Image (cartoon, grey):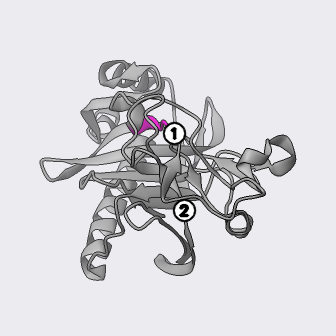
Amino acid sequence: MVDSRRSRLYVYANDGGRPRLVADYYVTLGKNGTEKTREGDQKTPIGVYHVTANLPRKKLTDFYGAGAFPINYPNEWDRRQGRNGHGIWLHGVPSDVYSRPPRASDGCIVLANADLVALGRQLQIGLTPVIIADEIEWSDAAALQAERASLAAELEHWRADWQSRDTERYLAHYSEHFAAPGQNYSSWAEHKRKVSAARNWIKVNLGRVTMVRYPRERDVVVVTFDQDYRSDGLSNLMKKRQYWAKEAERWKIIYEGPA
């Protein structure tokens, strides 16, 4: 997790559902601060991302130092907000530099080479979330657990309603503002009604569920999970990402797609 106001990157382990601090490092961020919105604005994005690759030193110029870890900016939420640009990485510094000033990158998150190497041991490609925020805010543990339980219950209702083939009850979990790759709510609903009508049975299991609140968006949570879908017409395993938002005090899905 990057606390942009303190120019610090904190590494937390998931210890039974609670964050346990493992390490923290000084980082350099964009010359023009945070909240990236467009190509070339030299800002670091605010949001929830994940590492997409590990680029070793030998594949890069010395500018990137010990290597680089690209993240998936712009993510689904960024594109929904009209943000663009690309090439936001966690990377090192040239071999003749120890570190750079707090605001000196073109938008990337830059660490001392030794710190990048240490961080790299903790990162899992496609799995480790990278949360970039204005600052870390600590919540009351009981309130946080209650909210997590509320969303977990909605996720389970969604799974059970999908499995039941009660398509209208299943679709009630989706916002009218919903979007998926190449689809809006209307086309999604039409597609799901056709698929459900063609199936005699559906089994859906979810595993490795994660829930991360989106920075600056009080009522938006990114939910990622492994999905095991089986039916009389299709069986597949995939990693899925959903964005849930509160609408009239009820959690609704506003985005869904592969992670």
Taking the image as drawn, is residue 224 in sight? no
Decide whether the magenta segment is chiefly helix, strand or loop: loop
Report which quarter residue 247 is drawn in: top left
Please tell me which of labels 2 and 1 falls first in the chain: 2
Which residue position is annotated with label 1?
A: 73
122 or 168: nearer the viewer: 122
Residue placed furthest toward the front? 96
Q: Residue at x 61, y 33 (%)?
A: 232
228 or 164: nearer the viewer: 228
Whole-percent x, y for residue 132 in the image: 44, 56
| Residues at marks 2 and 1, CA–CA distance in whole angstroms | 18 Å
Is residue 88 part of the magenta span, yes or no?
A: no
Whole-percent x, y for residue 202 in the image: 52, 40
Which residue position is annotated with label 2?
A: 27
Residue stretch rendered in magenta on the structure: 73-77
Q: Is residue 116 left or right of residue 145?
A: right
Q: Is residue 20 left or right of residue 250?
A: right
**Closer mark to the observer between disc 2 and disc 1:** 2
Q: Is residue 109 above or below residue 188?
A: below
Badge 2 vs badge 1, beta-carbon distance below 8 Å: no
Q: What is the three-letter code of the residue carrying label 1?
A: Tyr
Name the element at disc 2: loop
Whole-percent x, y for residue 239 in the image: 59, 46
Q: Residue at x 35, y 53 (%)?
A: 214
Quadrant where the image shows the C terminus: top right
Q: Is residue 192 above or below residue 118?
A: above
Taking the image as drawn, is residue 237 in sight? yes
Q: What is the three-letter code of the residue carrying label 2?
A: Val
Name the element at disc 1: loop
Q: Residue at x 37, y 48 (%)?
A: 158
193 or 242: nearer the viewer: 242
